[in-house]
Amino acid sequence: MDGAGKSSAQGGLIAFVQPFGLRDSSGGGRILRALLQEAPVPFLSICTSVRPPAPPPFGREVHLPPRPFFGRLEATRFARYLHWVAEWRRPIFEQALEQTILEAGALAIHAIPHGADFWYAYQIAERHGLPYILNIHDDLRYNLAGHPKLEFLMDRLAYVWQRANARIVISNAMGEAYSRWFGFMPYEVITDGLPDALPQAPRVHPPRRAVVYFMGALHLSYHRNFYVLARSLDLLRARRPGWQLACITRGSRLPVRPKQVPVRELPYAPETEVARDFDQVDVLYLPLPFGEQYAPFTRYSLSTKLVTYLGSGLPILYHGPADAAAAQLLARYGAAVQVHTLDAIPLSQAIEQALEERERLVEGALRLAYERFRLSDQRERFWQLLRRVDRRGA
């Protein structure tokens, strides 16, 4: 497709195809909201999840599921067989996707490969000479672990990587890895961003207080981290009996609670309310799962949670593998205390270290935020890329 395609991103409608909606609480939903709010061209979001999405906060969105939603069965062992329903309905879904894109008058297609729909969208773009933008948030080997068509879809992803008009990745680590695996092609690193008006210094910290905070979805893969965190808070209580200690989560329930330290669990909330949480907490907990089975995620992806934390004015406590993309980026800027083991003693000590070194840590985090994660910069790179696709078709 390089070098071909109709005029698109300068003024025509762009179709965004992905298995989540604009209001979704996932990192992908947050990135799309950040990039598409105040978009300079019209767009249509096509959500291909089986579960109906919440109404979008802005813009147009349609729900186009590849198969019916089976309610409670989705959370049972039966769910592993539901992909065969989607495979049986694939011709119907592909036809509906093509019809939706063409009837909307789309002049370019942007797709995020979290499932098979990126490939169907590419074939539509190829048939109709439409520019195609591939935007990779997570490695398919992580998103589709155990899927019977994973090998086929990885092969198709390599094919699309080489032929897309533009490629976007969530981290340099992702772009470098895909260039090694699939062949070097130019790409842009674009993700979520922070407002330009960031704190100039660390937030005021009350003495003898350590309130540890976690926001976002608590995946099963994080459970071992949180068992260690619970033990580490109890150890800190024994070591600092006169301190005010607490753990606050936003958007998740803990798999285990400390025995001696209170926990407050808050419901999911938009970014504006999360920002107000920072007034009452002291250390931001950033876990990533340990284990080789999670390496396709940790080594290449960057959590949008990390972006939020960087602009908070609070010290970050990273708890995960040392070879993760997030760990290496934070280390380059001295932007977090890091613990690379499932041992409660060093994690407990790291909470105190984060408080003691908060000025240095916050300075590094804010420098990283200004240099790499300003929302105005992310949007400018995104829309400049689409304008280049429009002018050259590549």
Image (tube, rainbow, N blue to C red):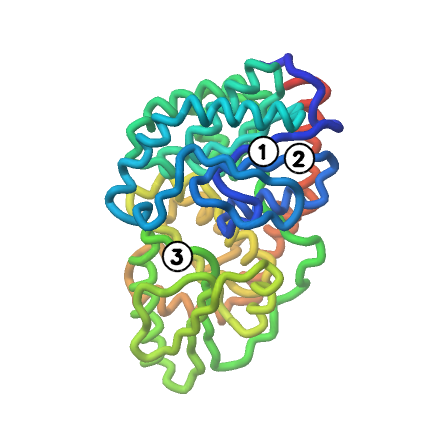
Of helix, strand and loop, which one carries label 2? strand
The location of residue 46, given as percent across then percent down, is: 55, 35
Q: Amino acid at mark 3?
A: Leu
Residue at 61%, 14% (x, y): give it.
Answer: 129
Where does label 1 land, which residue? 16
Cβ–Cβ under 8 Å for marks 3 and 1: no
Mark 1 closeness class: few <14, some 14–19, many ≥20 residues within 10 Å:
many
Earlier sequence position, callout 2 versus callout 3:
2
Q: Is residue 305 left or right of residue 10?
A: left
Q: Are marks 2 and 3 in contact (CB under 8 Å)?
A: no
Q: Is residue 222 above or below residue 45?
A: below
- Cα separation between marks 3 and 1: 27 Å
- Quickly name the residue at label 2: 43
Q: Quadrant of residue 150?
A: top left
Is label 3 in a helix, a strand or a loop? loop
Q: Residue at x 42, y 72 (%)?
A: 247
Q: Residues within 10 Å of mark 2 (few under 14, many from 20)?
A: many
* Three-letter code for the amino acid on which mark 1 is drawn: Phe
Check the image and report above or below for 133 versus 368.
Answer: above
Within 10 Å of disc 3 (Cα), the crowding (few <14, some 14-19, many 20+) is some
| Residue 333: % across, % down | 54, 51
Residue 105 has which mark? none
Q: Helix or strand or loop: what does disc 1 sit on?
A: strand
Mark 3 or 1, nearer chain start = 1
The earlier-in-sequence mark between 2 and 1 is 1
* Residue 41 in sight: yes
Which one is in front, 129 or 291? Answer: 129
As measured in the structure, the alpha-carbon distance from the residue carrying label 2 to the one carrying label 3 is: 31 Å
Write the residue at 56% across / 56% down: 308
Residue that lies at the very extreme toward the left in this rendered image: 77
Q: Position of residue 155 (x, y in %)?
A: 38, 21
